[in-house]
Amino acid sequence: MAASKVIIGVAILAIAGFLTWLTVSPKPAPPPAPVLTAEAAAYLPNLSLSDVQPQTSESYIQKSLFEVMGKITNNGSRTVSGIRVKCVFRDYYGKELKRELATVVSHPLAPGATAPFRLAFDVVPDTWNQQMPDLVIAEIRF
């Protein structure tokens, strides 16, 4: 009887210690915000988006999924290793509702090359104006 009380007490202390560790332990640092360097800003005119189309569909869990699909072309003379865009959703009055960072290119894109992209958003605000979100290049990596 006394042994079972000790085991229960030790288990409660272990659980309490674990929960304390989860809530007090240092959290990992958030990823750095994208930075459009001067070098990247100068290269920006060499990148072009085309065939950009919005699409809404149902996901496998009966949830609405909004997607933006298109192509990006590197018209410059340098290989680009990554491109991220800010997608800005607005309401019917033009007020910003949501801003989300999305990766358009995550592999090397050679000069003159075109790559397809697909951006999927499973959570969009109910008051979104149902228009194409603004796509603003936020980061270019070489």
Image (cartoon, rainbow, N blue to C red):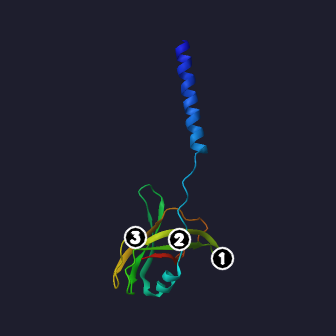
Reading the image, the residue beneath label 3 is: 106
Query: Which residue is the site of mark 1?
Result: 93
Q: Position of residue 63 (x, y in %)?
A: 48, 58
The disc labelled 2 sits on which kind of residue?
Pro
**Which amino acid, by three-letter code, is at mark 3?**
Ser
Of 78 and 63, the residue lying toward us: 78
Looking at the picture, tell me which residue is in the foreground, 49 or 131: 49
Secondary element under disc 1, as helix, strand or loop, is loop
Q: Which residue is mark 2?
A: 34
Residue 94 x, y percent position in the rendering:
64, 77
Q: Is residue 74 visible?
A: yes
Q: Tag 1: Cα neighbours inside 10 Å, few (<14), some, or many (≥20)?
A: few
Q: Residue at x 56, y 17 (%)?
A: 5
Inspect this view and state whether residue 129 appears: no
Crowd around label 2: few <14 · some 14–19 · many ≥20 (10 Å): some
**Residue 127: percent from left, percent from top:** 61, 68
In the picture shown, does residue 142 fall above or below 120? below
Tell me if 34 is positioned left or right of 72 in this view. Answer: right
Element at label 3: loop
Residue 128 lies in what quarter of the image? bottom right
Q: Residue at x 37, y 75 (%)?
A: 116
Which quadrant would the N terminus be assigned to in this image?
Answer: top right
